[in-house]
Image: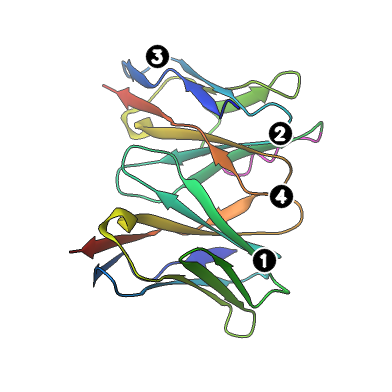
Amino acid sequence: GAGVSQSPSNKVTEKGKDVELRCDPISGHTALYWYRQSLGQGLEFLIYFQGNSAPDKSGLPSDRFSAERTGGSVSTLTIQRTQQEDSAVYLCASSWTDYYEQYFGPGTRLTVT
Amino acid sequence: SQKIEQNSEALNIQEGKTATLTCNYTNYSPAYLQWYRQDPGRGPVFLLLIRENEKEKRKERLKVTFDTTLKQSLFHITASQPADSATYLCAGGSTLGRLYFGRGTQLTVWP
């Protein structure tokens, strides 16, 4: 079956612009996660959705970052007024529920110029 | 705060040897640990999960242990091959909520 997909695969934007990154999880997966990975660094947790529960936003680095998940499926990560330090690969993952392995998408490489 | 530590940033071994990667956790007691493999430019891929009440788990050439006394997990790749070269990530989680990932260990297997 289809895996986790993310779009766009690459995004170049000017400093100060807003960007939206999309994640399509595996059908039936109730948990969805967003991570950020800078060059040569580990995974930085951003936000986590589980079913209809309130999302865990504890990893969002600033109020310029927000995310939503519509209908328990597709998720969009929005970064407002982008800064150069936002440049990174943004990874989305989904899983059946909390306890299970996560399936990662290929990521969106964001470059802020 | 909860922390997963992979103390070795890089590990270089010869083909055919056993690679052993270490993962330590502090300030919490994960219900389970997961190991992932990440190749350059790709998302991580799940390898193994081990629960706190399990001492050891095996899958083909892979073996993972979970020592709650030492607060440590060891990940072994036996008969290593150059194709095993990648970054390996350890992650800890509880029954509810997010995973905490370590920074990863870059393994290089040379012929």
User: Which label number is shown at residue A29?
Assistant: 2
Alpha carbon separation for disc pair 4 and 3: 32 Å
The answer for which chain carries disc 3 is A
Query: B49 above or below B11?
Result: above
Task: Indicate the secondary structure of the residue bearing disc 3.
Answer: loop
Q: Main secondary structure of the magenta part?
A: loop
Q: Which residue is mark 3?
A: A17
Question: Quick check: A7 left or right of B50?
Answer: left
Q: Which residue is mark 1?
A: B30
Q: Are marks 4 and 1 in contact (CB under 8 Å)?
A: no
Q: Which residues are magenta?
A: A53-59
Same chain for labels 4 and 2? Say yes or no.
no
Q: Position of residue B99 (x, y in %)?
A: 61, 52
Which corner quadrant of the image does residue A32 belong to?
Answer: top right
Task: Indicate the secondary structure of the residue bearing disc 1.
Answer: loop
| Residue B37 visible in the current orientation | yes
Label 2 packing within 10 angstroms: few (<14), some (14-19), many (20+): some
Query: B18 above or below B40?
Result: below
Same chain for labels 4 and 3? Say yes or no.
no
* Mark 3 or 1: the one toward you: 1
Alpha carbon separation for disc pair 3 and 1: 39 Å
Label 3 packing within 10 angstroms: few (<14), some (14-19), many (20+): few
Q: Are marks 3 and 1 in contact (CB under 8 Å)?
A: no
Q: Which residue is mark 4?
A: B97
The answer for which chain carries disc 4 is B
- Residue type at numbered disc 3: Lys
Name the residue at 41% across, 57% down.
Answer: B88
* Mark 1 or 2: the one toward you: 2
Name the residue at 64% across, 29% down.
Answer: A26
